[in-house]
Image (cartoon, rainbow, N blue to C red):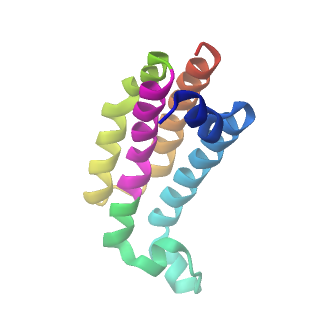
Amino acid sequence: LNKKIFSEFCWGSERQFLGAWAYMNVIKSFAADTRDIDEDKRAGFKTLAVTVGRHFASHLQALFLLFPYLVLVSMAAASSPIFYLPLVTLPFALNLSVACFQGEHFMLPKKVARLDAVFGLLYVFSVFFS
């Protein structure tokens, strides 16, 4: 792929920041939905976590946590190595992914919010200096 086409299509100025911000909110929201799956089921809410069940919701949560790192690698390969900077948060994301499968959903939204804050700051820093 041509670097300029790839950059303009996927990561053009305002879309970069808005896309990352929107995705971070999806991760936090799904972490809360996974934590509250039993209460939501009793209340009759049809969230994604309720629909797919606790086991598959844990798989989705792990995927949602790790997907931004795949995007970072593709961004760094297509434009600037500075996009590797947020990868320093990968060990924390891996720990949270493992916690999804161990049933530690109570503190997950808070920990995901912390990860998102650090990841987001490093991401914005890398976009600014790319």
The answer to whether residue 35 is above or below residue 127 is below
Main secondary structure type of the part rendered in magenta: helix
**15 or 7: which is nearer to us?**
7
Q: Magenta segment, which residues? A: 61-79
The answer to whether residue 125 is above or below residue 43 is above
> Is residue 66 within the magenta segment?
yes
> Could you tell me which residue is drawn at 65 percent across and 48 percent down?
22
Q: Quadrant of the C terminus?
A: top right
Query: How many marks are shown on the rendered structure?
Result: 0
Which residue is farthest right?
A: 14
> Could you tell me which residue is drawn at 38 percent across and 23 percent down?
88
The answer to whether residue 34 is above or below residue 72 is below
> Residue 16, position in %: x, y?
65, 35
> Could you tell me which residue is drawn at 41 percent across and 37 percent down?
69
**68 or 1: which is nearer to us?**
1
Which residue is farthest top?
A: 129
> Is residue 77 within the magenta segment?
yes
> Could you tell me which residue is drawn at 42 percent across and 56 percent down?
106
Res 107 seen here:
no
Residue 13 found in image quarter = top right
**129 or 63: which is nearer to us?**
129
Res 33 seen here:
yes
> Residue 111, position in %: x, y?
45, 42
The answer to whether residue 37 is above or below residue 41 is above
> Residue 97, position in %: x, y?
32, 49
> Residue 102, position in %: x, y?
25, 57
Residue 84 found in image quarter = top left
Q: In the shown orientation, is residue 4 left or right of residue 102?
A: right
**23 or 53: which is nearer to us?**
23
